[in-house]
Image (cartoon, grey):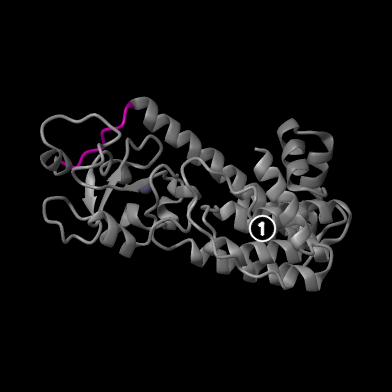
């Protein structure tokens, strides 16, 4: 603990986070893989994110944005799996700084990047992973096999692929080929949680129970094996996520076009909506007048 604290202090002094030149000149570090349950708190991209929060609090949005841009630049090379949400902080900061075109550009870039393969290191959630293992790593190091889990929160289609071993490229004929629907991100399955781990045959044990031999088990009939509760919980998740997405769309539109009537933060807007306050009703009415249509009805 003390050692990491000292290292942290040292890092803070090694870099200049107080000027644009200082932040922009930070180089991508050459990371060694994290061992076990390590955390990235000594990583420069982590410190950059903390600094961005500080700069924002002090009203220095240019420095805050520079920190997040630099962090996003470093993330793909990190020894830690940064999530899409981590990358998207930059987009939110840009919007708050009213740089809407730049925000859209960055968002597009991030979305494209996250459409890559979803295979990851053991123990890390796919949803929160971008670096992980590449398809090539899985083939070279793990013989091309991956393991899917008891998919508690996914759609009917993804559910068919729960608790199996797959061959990532179909070359290992003992196992079924990994279907694209769980291998890649897609809009259709954006609410499905379908983690995959690399699986070393003969060394790793599956994280779930099975009967008979693992090869036959993995080739069993494709059926939605979810319980009633699992199906319900997925439906609930989709409903909630869609509601938040809709609210965000409405909020972003209003914040860009009519900042004078729109709350300062999305969190504030959501609270206002949840309590169905007078101010919220007033905002909806104003929005309809300003936009010329009822957003929630037409979208
Ligand atoms: Zn799905």
Does residue 94 appear in the picture of this structure? no
Task: Reply yes or no: does residue 233 show up in magenta.
Answer: no
Position of residue 262 measured from the top left corner of the image (x, y, whole percent): 82, 51
Please report the residue visible at 11 percent of the width from the left and 51 percent of the height from the top.
Answer: 174
| Quadrant housing residue 267 | top right
Observer-nearest residue: 5 or 149?
5
Q: Is residue 56 left or right of residue 79?
A: right
- Please tell me whether residue 264 is drawn above or below residue 268 in the rendered image: below
Q: Main secondary structure of the magenta part?
A: loop
- Please tell me whether residue 28 is drawn above or below residue 34 in the rendered image: below
Q: Is residue 193 left or right of residue 69?
A: left
Magenta range: 221-227
Does residue 79 appear in the picture of this structure? yes
Label 1 beta carbon less than 8 Å to ligand 1: no
Q: Could you tell me how many numbered marks the image carries?
A: 1
Q: Is residue 269 left or right of residue 170?
A: right
Position of residue 55 measured from the top left corner of the image (x, y, whole percent): 83, 56
Circle 1 residues within 10 Å: few <14, some 14–19, many ≥20: many
Observer-nearest residue: 299 or 77?
77
Position of residue 9 measured from the top left corner of the image (x, y, whole percent): 75, 50
Please report the residue visible at 50 percent of the width from the left and 50 percent of the height from the top.
Answer: 34
The quadrant the N terminus occupies is: top right
Please report the residue visible at 20 percent of the width from the left and 46 percent of the height from the top.
Answer: 201
Position of residue 91 measured from the top left corner of the image (x, y, whole percent): 67, 61
Please report the residue visible at 26 percent of the width from the left and 37 percent of the height from the top.
Answer: 206
For label 1, the SS is: helix
| Quadrant housing residue 44 | bottom right
Which residue is disc 1 drawn over?
44
């Amino acid at each position: 603990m003390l050692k990491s604290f000292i290292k942290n202090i040292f890092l803070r002094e090694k870099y200049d986070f107080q000027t644009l030149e200082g932040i922009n000149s930070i180089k991508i570090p050459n990371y060694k893989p994290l061992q076990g349950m390590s955390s990235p708190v000594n990583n420069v991209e982590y410190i950059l994110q903390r600094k961005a929060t500080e700069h924002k609090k002090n009203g220095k949005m240019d420095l805050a944005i520079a920190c997040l841009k630099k962090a996003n630049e470093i993330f793909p090379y990190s020894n830690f799996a940064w999530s899409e949400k981590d990358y998207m902080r930059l987009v939110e900061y840009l919007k708050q700084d009213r740089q809407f075109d730049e925000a859209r550009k960055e968002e597009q870039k991030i979305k494209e990047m996250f459409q890559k393969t979803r295979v990851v290191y053991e123990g890390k959630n796919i949803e929160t992973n971008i670096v992980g293992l590449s398809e090539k790593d899985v083939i070279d190091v793990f013989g091309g096999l991956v393991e899917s889990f008891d998919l508690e929160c996914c759609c009917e289609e993804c559910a068919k692929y729960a608790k199996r071993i797959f061959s990532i490229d179909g070359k290992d004929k003992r196992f079924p080929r990994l279907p694209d629907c769980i291998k890649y991100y897609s809009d259709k399955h954006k609410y499905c949680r379908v983690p995959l781990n690399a699986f070393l045959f003969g060394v790793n044990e599956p994280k779930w129970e099975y009967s008979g031999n693992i090869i036959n088990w993995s080739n069993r009939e494709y059926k939605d094996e979810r319980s009633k509760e699992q199906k319900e919980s997925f439906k609930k998740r989709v409903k909630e996520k869609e509601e938040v997405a809709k609210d965000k769309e409405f909020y972003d539109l209003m914040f860009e076009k009519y900042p004078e009537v729109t709350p300062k933060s999305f969190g504030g807007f959501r609270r206002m909506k949840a309590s169905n306050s007078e101010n919220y009703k007033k905002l909806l009415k104003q929005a309809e007048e300003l936009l010329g249509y009822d957003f929630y009805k037409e979208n």
